[in-house]
Amino acid sequence: MNVLQETTNVTPSRSSVEAPGRVYLVGAGPGAPDLLTVRAHRLIQRARVLVYDRLVSEEILALAPESATRVFVGKAPSRHSLSQTEINALLVSLAMTGRDVVRLKGGDPFIFGRGGEEAEQLALHGIAFEVVPGITAASGCTTSLGIPLTHRGVATGARFVTGHCREGVDLDLNWNSLADPQTTLVVYMGLANARCMSERLQEAGLSGDTPALAIASGTTPQQRTCRSTLRDLPRDVAAAGLRAPVLLVIGKVVAEAERLGIYGMPAGRADLTQEVRRA
Ligand code: SAH
């Protein structure tokens, strides 16, 4: 029996319930539970049904009532995972049971989270939904490390791009527009394609000396970083053995944060914050 059947085999048809529940597409932030929004926290605490991805931590799930039904739909080795189409259908059928559903996604649901597709399906089926923004990995991971994504005189903007592509297909990005030394480039899902990113950006004219940083499991106790340059990033990331989720940050702000002495502030360390408060 797959997850879809398992969670919906008690599902009455639409006609047998008074009204469908509401679906909350909720951003869970970059990992640290204390980087949830107050709204997300409140919704999780009163959730009856939680549908969650791999990036949502145990600590965040633990905030839900014990009695809540938890449905894992992320991709993980050795666990059955659903396609996006199945997830869309699952959300619709769970809402049809008349229960509210909290659909938890890492970061922000609308930034590389496919939240737009889920919202579209809910709208198509006439199911009320609300989208709750979350701190996306780009700002959560960098800002908590003391790296400003934009900085006067250093970076006039930031671009968020995906480094993911279908197997065997080359990354289809506008390299010329991305190779801008005044812009901070943040690459989601870029670990597997770090070499391609590095080579194409250099071919498009971005200096190989451009500072770069890879952040793994940012804001969590498992956080690891690898400081490098655009040229050496693929080699250094591989040597460091970083494991997903990994965010790549390419741009002068990385070195600027070091120069300003603000790089490396403790990330998401509520324990340290308390110590500072006590001191
Ligand atoms: N909706 C999410 C992004 C989902 S795509 C958001 O807004 O953050 C998944 C990618 O996000 C990962 O491959 C990684 O590049 C990035 N990511 C998410 N959480 C991260 C974390 N804690 N540390 C590093 N990268 C993270």
Image: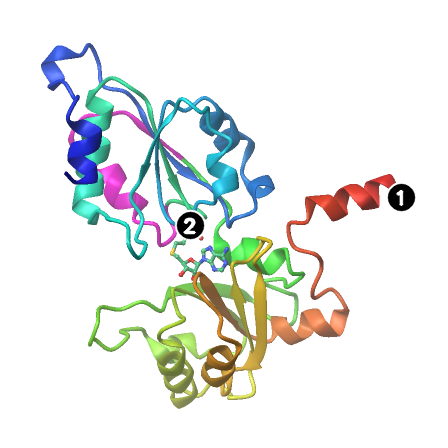
Ligand 1 positioned in quadrant: bottom left
Q: Amino acid at mark 2?
A: Leu
Q: Secondary structure at mark 1?
A: loop
Front residue of this view, candidates 126 and 153:
126
State the residue position of label 2. Answer: 55
Q: Which residues are magenta?
A: 110-131
Any atom of ligand 1 within 8 Å of the CB at mark 2? Answer: yes
Residue 74 in the image: x percent, y percent?
31, 48
Q: Amino acid at mark 1?
A: Ala
Identity of the residue drawn at 48% across and 51% down: 136
State the residue position of label 1. Answer: 279
- Magenta includes 117? yes
Where residue 155 sits, quadrant-wise, is bottom right
Q: Is residue 38 above or below residue 198?
A: above
Residue 207 in the image: x percent, y percent?
51, 88
Does residue 16 show up? Answer: yes
On-image quarter of the C terminus: top right
Identity of the residue drawn at 36% across and 84% down: 200
Image label count: 2
